[in-house]
Amino acid sequence: MAARVRASLERQGMMATLGVELVALERGRVEMALPYDDRFTQQHGFLHAGAVASVLDSACGYAAYSVMAPDASVLTVTYTINLLAPAAGQRFSIIGQVVRAGRTLVVCRGEAFADGSEMPFAAMQATMTALYGRPGISG
Amino acid sequence: MAARVRASLERQGMMATLGVELVALERGRVEMALPYDDRFTQQHGFLHAGAVASVLDSACGYAAYSVMAPDASVLTVTYTINLLAPAAGQRFSIIGQVVRAGRTLVVCRGEAFADGSEMPFAAMQATMTALYGRPGISG
Amino acid sequence: MAARVRASLERQGMMATLGVELVALERGRVEMALPYDDRFTQQHGFLHAGAVASVLDSACGYAAYSVMAPDASVLTVTYTINLLAPAAGQRFSIIGQVVRAGRTLVVCRGEAFADGSEMPFAAMQATMTALYGRPGISG
Amino acid sequence: MAARVRASLERQGMMATLGVELVALERGRVEMALPYDDRFTQQHGFLHAGAVASVLDSACGYAAYSVMAPDASVLTVTYTINLLAPAAGQRFSIIGQVVRAGRTLVVCRGEAFADGSEMPFAAMQATMTALYGRPGISG
């Protein structure tokens, strides 16, 4: 399972571009780290919500993927993100966890934390789907 | 109003990094263009949902900003995005529009279209807030 | 199609209890009417968001059902609702429409209007799923 | 605080009609119970998502209200609900909790459980707002 997650993650150009690292991985839970980078800011100089959302989405997606059958691929159906405070900090910890896994749909929640804070600055609720046997879609 | 939007948008490192262009701007409606770029892909080679979400978020945010008082700043409170199909294409058109503006909260909807298609591949519903007189927050 | 929608709707105890009427029905679009009733209020005397959300959910669900195969059943996966203003009025018009239908998932949007207003007081974005061959689930 | 919550809850016609009881209340956390009732079913005989969403919305709303200033009123801005499984059971436990409270916006999460199960069948992420000094709005 860990090998499948790492292989898929390495193919995400977006995660490499953002400088994301996989910090921890277990069945149903993924933790990633995202560094501050002024290429990805919003107009007030904080990290753009889109960068945080991208990593929360990937963390939730891989948490879901980690509980799917080995031949499944994972796609995001929809997510909701609340931005509870600006993304102010140098290093962001991003955690995705499975809430409940159904036959094809897996619901996850994610939180983002800045510089070791225990109070999240962003919260996500996401719906992922397992795909099987679609040409061109694997991982 | 257009000058305020352009000035704020130019300060978003994220939009410059993604290569986003402002295509059209009127009160309550913003249209942007996002090119395909393999720095921002997900594991199947399509554009990462996070890149699309970032631009939808900005388009909705500036649509909201365009109806706010001149001394307001805009922040995203929350959004929901549905990914209706993979982001397959070379050039994506991203449109944000105000649904209803209240005293401080403005609700917007956005759609993303690939290569001139009239069927959206992503849909957003977003809640923006106007901020006044916060140190370090302008635009 | 209309017969399937009406048969399923008549089995919804919730819609009967709320006094909901089906006003219009076409492929991909459903319009319902909800009367004010002080059994369903919130603490300020307006209609409770839950009553409005129930009808928006059903309108979106039947809009999705109307484009599904005849042997499909419909279930709500997730929805987001924005409450743009209090539900102040005597009669509410609730409209659900399909944005895009995939193999099993159908994404819809809904709006709620009070007393003939053209400005919505609530907006929904919903994800519905088609189910096939589940015992005890039909319509 | 508990007196304010109870007084406001007692004014919600919707909660009385649904037969909802307040089970537990502390700062930032509210637990309610909702009985099965065939007046509030969907087409397959399960409790309608709208009934569950109504109570989750109220539980999140009162969790938010419990951390607001005494003269604040509470309104729901937006919520997202995931329906993880049908609402099958006789008695549903509905819990709302504050994730993070800002100046005027409070973000909460809720879960719904059937008949003592520890696995939620519905999950909500909600954004509440504090209102001050609005005529006709109190509690």
Image (cartoon, coloured by chain):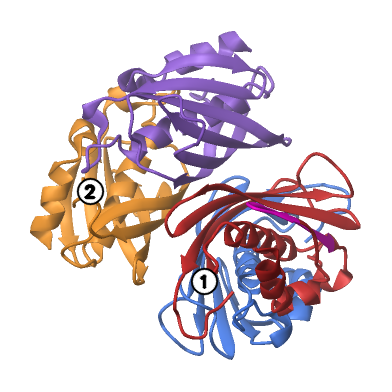
Chain colours: A blue, B red, C purple, D orange
**In the foreground, C56 or C83:** C83
Tell me the number on the disc at residue B71.
1
Q: Does residue D51 sit above or below C11 in this rendering?
A: below
Give x and y (percent) for residue A43: 64, 77
Tell me the number on the disc at residue B48.
none
Residue C69 in the magenta stretch? The answer is: no
Q: Which residue: 23% across, 33% down?
A: D18
Q: Would residue B108 be found to the left or right of residue C122 on screen?
A: right
In terms of secondary structure, where does tag 1 sit? Answer: loop
For disc 2, the marked residue is: D137
Which residue type does callout 2 highlight?
A: Ile
Quadrant of the rendered structure where residue A67 is? bottom right
Q: Which residue: 66% across, 17% down?
A: C70
Q: Would residue A24 be found to the left or right of residue D113 on screen?
A: right
Q: Disc 2 sits on a residue from what chain?
A: D
What residue span does the magenta drawing correspond to? B25-34
Q: Main secondary structure of the magenta part?
A: strand
Q: Nearer the viewer, mark 1 or mark 2?
A: 1
Q: Residues within 10 Å of mark 2 (few under 14, many from 20)?
A: some
In terms of secondary structure, where does tag 2 sit? Answer: loop
Give x and y (percent) for residue D81: 46, 48
**In the foreground, C122 or C99:** C122
